[in-house]
Amino acid sequence: MENFRFETQERSGDTIGEIAYRRIRSHIVNGQLLPDSKLKLDRMKEIYGASVTTLREILNRLAVEELVTAEGQRGFRVAGVSGAEFRELAALRMLLETHALRASIGQGDIEWEASVVAAHYKLAVAERNHIAGNEGGVDQWVSCDWGFHYATIAACGQPVLMKTHASIFDRFVRYHMLAMNFRGQGVVDDHNALRDLVIERNADGAVTLLQRHIQSGFDHVMSTGRFD
């Protein structure tokens, strides 16, 4: 289920609330809803097609995920951002994802390997579209980037860690989207190499590369000067 978090299209069996939740969440993570902006329920009702009661439930849910700030009687705002928070998110992502990656490489079977290869193929297509500036390329890349990293750690057998990591990952990616500064070929090369190391069951090499990948992403975003 986790690999559907960034999808905004309706799926069979979805409620209006679930569709609205994914759309609002996606719009926060991809930067369409800006940090600290007021979330006006009447306007959101028009945009997302959900009732005010449902929207309140969604925003409270997103507040628990720390993507929204609840202001008591004053309503809700999109969560703010800061360099200090981004630094902490990078450290937490590195800690959780490297641990899960090592465990996943040690425990994954042939079906897991196939899922990693398939997820990487989708990501490679999304990266080409993003670099080419194709319409929808950014949203596709966000979804497929998550899908690949999720696939690499999916065999770790630690559901609590996975749930915590998913929340941290999204908040980390949000800073990348707000910076609007894709790293280009460097990140493509990292993903290619990570796929190969995972399939080779080279846990030490994969963990080292992942650490560098996350640190490079952090450094790249901070170099924009938007989150000092």
Image (tube, grey):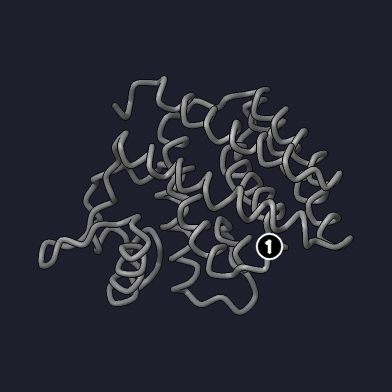
- Report the side of 203 relative to 50 (left or right): right
Please rate how many residues cluster around mark 1, counting C-alpha atoms within 10 Å: few if below 14, some from 14 to 19, many from 20: some
Q: Pick the quarter of the image with the C terminus.
A: top left
Foreground pick, 157 / 56 = 157
Against 161, is 95 above or below? above
* Residue at screen point 50% across, 67% down: 19
Q: Pick the quarter of the image with the N terminus.
A: bottom right
- Report the side of 21 relative to 69 (left or right): right
- Residue hosting label 1: 156
- At which x and y percent is residue 150? 65, 54
* Residue at screen point 60% across, 64% down: 2
- At which x and y percent is residue 86? 38, 39
- At which x and y percent is residue 204? 72, 41
* Residue at screen point 44% across, 65% down: 20
Q: Secondary structure at mark 1?
A: loop
Quarter of the image holding residue 45? Answer: bottom left
Against 202, is 63 above or below? below
Q: Residue furthest right?
A: 110
Quarter of the image holding residue 104? Answer: bottom right
* Residue at screen point 52% across, 48% down: 95
Against 55, is 36 above or below? above
Q: What residue type is disc 1 on?
A: Cys
- At which x and y percent is residue 152? 71, 52
Foreground pick, 145 / 103 = 103
